[in-house]
Amino acid sequence: NVDVRKVDYTFQQLSDWRALLQSRAEWMRLVRTDDVDELENRLRVGVIDDASVAYLRRALTAAGVPSKALTVVVAPRLAPSQSIDNRA
């Protein structure tokens, strides 16, 4: 079965806004994760702290990204992956 539903933004729009985010070093220093969330039809950004949530929302909307297109949340610090070669 194919599930068709109305979305607010095209994948290309979300990808373009993600590229905009990634093009700005001063923004990326605050980012832990970023992704085009196809299921929610949003640009999802995980940041280092609460102040970064507000800052990035303001900066991205000022740059033309609709506020409704953004999900900006505090993301936990990711632990480094452990490979087979460095088992405890």
Image: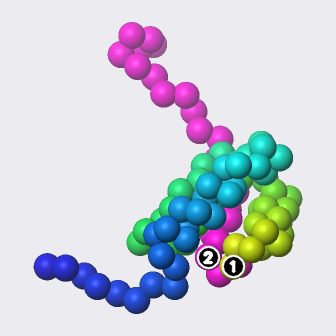
Quarter that holds the C terminus: top left
Q: Which residue is mark 2?
A: 69
Task: Compare residues 62 and 53 and report the one nearer the observer.
Answer: 62
| Marks 1/2: CA–CA distance | 5 Å
Q: Amino acid at mark 1?
A: Pro
Q: Is residue 73 magenta?
A: yes
Number of other residues with Cα within 10 Å of mark 1, as a class: few under 14, some 14 to 19, many 20 or more: few
Residue 36, percent from left and from top? 51, 62
SS for callout 1: loop
Q: Circles 1 and 2: CB distance less than 8 Å?
A: yes
Relative horizontal placement of residue 19, taking residue 9 as reference (left or right):
right
Q: Residue at the left extreme?
A: 1
Q: Which residue is mark 1?
A: 66
The numbered disc on residue 50 is none
Relative horizontal placement of residue 86, taking residue 63 as reference (left or right):
left
Residue 82, percent from left and from top? 45, 22
Task: Compare residues 15 and 36 and report the one nearer the observer.
Answer: 15
Residue 48 in sight = no
SS for callout 2: helix
Q: Is residue 45 above or below residue 62?
A: above
Magenta range: 67-88
Q: Amino acid at mark 2?
A: Ala
Residue 10, percent from left and from top? 48, 76
Quarter that holds the N terminus: bottom left
Q: Residue at position x 68%, y 65% from top?
A: 72
Residue 27 in sight = yes
